[in-house]
C-alpha cells in the first residue's frame, strides 16, 4: 500500500514512471534510502542503544544465558544458581540459543555444590555476589562477566 501511495504522490507531482523514468527512479530511491536510514537510526540509536529492547531483565537473562552456554567448549555439567525469578526452563530462548544444552538449576546455597574440574557455574543477577565470594574461596578458575548495557546480568565461573 505504501508503494501505491508513493506512486500516486509522484504521479500528482508530475513525476510518473511513464513520463520521466530517471526522475521517478531517483525519487523512489531517495524515499527508500531515507526510510532505511531513519529506521536504522531509530532502532540502533534510540531503541537498542538505550537498552529498551526485551520485556524485562529476566527475559534478557534467559537469552544471555543461552548464548553463553553455547560457547562452553566442553560437555561437562553447567549449573545455574537459580531462584524464584531466574531459573532454567522459564524461557524457550535459552534452549534455542544453547542448542538444547542441559543446565541444572541449583537453588541451594553454593557451598552445597560440589563441582568437578571444568564444570561451569552460572549466577543470576541476584546471586552474583554469592558466586564471587565462592570463587575467591576456590581460586584458579575462570570468571566471566556478561553485561546488559551497564548492568551485570550474568557471572560464570569455570571450575579449575
Image: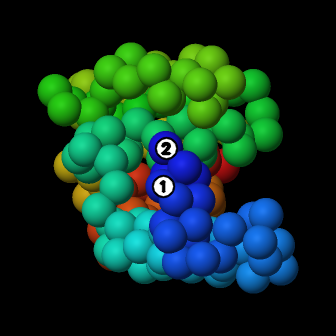
Q: Which residue is mark 2?
A: 1
Q: Report the label total.
A: 2
Residue 41: % across, % down: 48, 78
Q: Are marks 1 and 2 in contact (CB under 8 Å)?
A: yes
User: In this orientation, which residue lies closer to the viewer: 131 or 144?
Assistant: 144
User: In this orientation, which residue lies closer to the viewer: 159 or 77?
Assistant: 77
Secondary structure at badge 2 equals: loop
Residue 47: % across, % down: 36, 67
Query: Image check: 142 left or right of 74?
Result: left
Residue 8: % across, % down: 52, 59
Which residue is rendered at x = 83% and y = 79% of the image? 22
Q: Which residue is mark 1?
A: 5
| Extreme residue in the right direction | 22
Q: Residues within 10 Å of mark 2 (few under 14, many from 20)?
A: few
Which residue is rendered at x = 27% and y = 33% of the image? 86
The image quadrant that residue 68 belongs to is top right
Which residue is rendered at x = 75% and y = 65% of the image? 17
Secondary structure at badge 1 equals: helix
Q: Is residue 138 above or below residue 99?
A: below
Amino acid at each position: 500500500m505504501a508503494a501505491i501511495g508513493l506512486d500516486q504522490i509522484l504521479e500528482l507531482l508530475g513525476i510518473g514512471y511513464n513520463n520521466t523514468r530517471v526522475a521517478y527512479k531517483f525519487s523512489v530511491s531517495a524515499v527508500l534510502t531515507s526510510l532505511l536510514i531513519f529506521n536504522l537510526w531509530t532502532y540502533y540509536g534510540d531503541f537498542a542503544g538505550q537498552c529498551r529492547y526485551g520485556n524485562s531483565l529476566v527475559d534478557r537473562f534467559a537469552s544471555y544465558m543461552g548464548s553463553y552456554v553455547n560457547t562452553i567448549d566442553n560437555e561437562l555439567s553447567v549449573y545455574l544458581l537459580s531462584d524464584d525469578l531466574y531459573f532454567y526452563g522459564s524461557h524457550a530462548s535459552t534452549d534455542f540459543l544453547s542448542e538444547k544444552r542441559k543446565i541444572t538449576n541449583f537453588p541451594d546455597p553454593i557451598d552445597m555444590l560440589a563441582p568437578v574440574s571444568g564444570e561451569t557455574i552460572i549466577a543470576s543477577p541476584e546471586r552474583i555476589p554469592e558466586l564471587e565470594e565462592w570463587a575467591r574461596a576456590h581460586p584458579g578458575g575462570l570468571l566471566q562477566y556478561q553485561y546488559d548495557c551497564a548492568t551485570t546480568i550474568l557471572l560464570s565461573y569455570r571450575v579449575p
